[in-house]
Image (cartoon, rainbow, N blue to C red):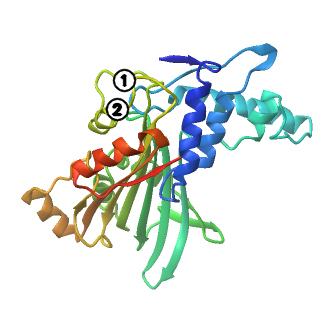
């Protein structure tokens, strides 16, 4: 589905507003960078041209191709300002200055820092951000791990650390699905002990401004059921999954994401000494709040709801 910038203005304003109200914690992708991305999509180009961008049908977020294009354009714009020894003004009306000054989200990135040092092991935290190719949603994996030996992680300066090429590859491969699966797969790395993985996802956004995808996920189907036929209203999900040693018990408070509690899986969790919890928050337009509260009550789950 293609949207022109002037036609997409209500959609962009809605999503930016919901992200502002959501105020996601550091366990989620950086909402400020996402708002910068959305803000650029609403700006006119030179000579009055308009950006044409794609929206992922399941996520309700602009597609990866849209972000990739802006990141390429930003590289060129920043190179120009550097060559001219100019500082771009983020408040300027010109698209090139706003683009060069913007802090855009990455397609994918991995950052690491040292948390503590102890005899025999150093504790690190890794933050892996990705605009997910499958779901179309911005996702952040936060991983706590101990390094006993080897050099998969090395200190750079202060508490900043660098991940080896192998570790970057392993994290990207492991973090393609759930936090539990990522923890299980990364525990196979020699010299590392992964103690906890948290997966924070922003989205989907469900709104009458976007057509329903042909095969919507369970959460999008349920939330779409409370929408009116039209209007600049919507609901944004914030889903959080924790898997690790500090999770005290298996818990499934997300009404639309099932948690496997079979004996086989429970035994595997016990052998690893971990539990898994699933949570969800919703942020909505005020007009949708009564219907959403009724929907949440019917699920018999604890879901925090906030409206704009």
Does residue 60 show up? yes
On residue 224, which mark appears? 2
Closer to us: 5 or 289: 289
Furthest-right residue in this view: 85
Q: Is residue 49 left or right of residue 294?
A: right
Residue at image x 32%, y 59%?
Answer: 183
Q: Position of residue 89 (x, y in %)?
A: 85, 40
Q: Say if mark 2 contacts mark 1, CB within 8 Å.
A: yes
Number of other residues with Cα within 10 Å of mark 2, as a class: few under 14, some 14 to 19, many 20 or more: some
Q: Answer with mark 2 or mark 1, whichever residue precedes in sequence.
A: 1
Query: Along the horizontal axis of the image, is 69 left or right of 121?
Result: right
The residue nearer to you, when weighing 41 against 134, is: 41
Of 78 and 147, nearer the camera is 78
The nearer-to-camera label among 2 and 1 is: 2
Task: Name above or below for residue 37 compared with residue 54.
Answer: below
Kindly identify the residue that appears in the image at 54 percent across and 37 percent down.
15
- Nearer the observer, 257 or 83: 257
- Residue 87 placement: quadrant: top right
Residue 148, percent across and down? Answer: 41, 74
Label 1 SS: loop
Q: Report whether residue 105 is seen.
A: no
Percent coordinates x, y for residue 6 in the rendering? 65, 19
Q: Quadrant of residue 133?
A: top left
In the drawing, what numbered circle is on residue 212?
1
Q: Secondary structure at mark 2?
A: helix
| Number of numbered callouts drawn | 2
Q: Position of residue 303 (x, y in %)?
A: 34, 55
């Amino acid at each position: 589905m293609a949207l022109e910038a002037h036609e997409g203005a209500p959609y962009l304003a809605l999503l930016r507003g919901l992200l502002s109200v959501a105020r996601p914690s550091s366990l989620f992708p950086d909402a400020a960078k996402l708002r910068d991305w959305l803000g650029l999509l609403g700006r006119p180009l030179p000579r009055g041209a308009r950006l044409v961008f794609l929206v992922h049908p399941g996520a309700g977020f602009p597609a990866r191709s849209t972000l990739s294009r802006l990141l390429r354009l930003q590289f060129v714009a920043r190179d120009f300002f550097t060559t001219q020894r100019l500082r771009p003004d983020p408040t300027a009306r010109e698209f090139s200055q706003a683009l060069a000054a913007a802090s855009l989200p990455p397609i994918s990135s991995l950052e690491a820092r040292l948390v503590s040092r102890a005899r025999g092991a150093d504790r690190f935290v890794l933050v892996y951000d990705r605009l997910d190719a499958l779901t179309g949603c911005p996702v952040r994996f936060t991983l706590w791990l101990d390094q006993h030996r080897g050099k998969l992680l090395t200190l750079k300066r202060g508490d900043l650390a660098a991940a080896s090429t192998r570790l970057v590859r392993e994290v990207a491969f492991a973090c393609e699905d759930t936090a539990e699966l990522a923890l299980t797969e990364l525990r196979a790395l020699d010299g590392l002990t992964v103690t906890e993985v948290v997966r924070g996802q922003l989205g989907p956004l469900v709104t009458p401004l976007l057509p329903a995808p042909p095969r919507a996920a369970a959460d999008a189907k349920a939330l779409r059921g409370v929408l009116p036929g039209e209007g600049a209203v919507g609901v944004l999900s914030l889903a959080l999954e924790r898997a690790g040693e500090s999770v005290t018990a298996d818990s499934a408070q997300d009404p639309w994401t099932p948690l496997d509690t079979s004996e086989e899986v429970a035994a595997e969790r016990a052998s690893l000494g971990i539990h898994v919890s699933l949570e969800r928050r919703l942020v909505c337009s005020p007009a949708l709040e009564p219907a959403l509260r009724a929907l949440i009550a019917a699920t018999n789950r604890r879901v925090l709801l906030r409206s704009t």
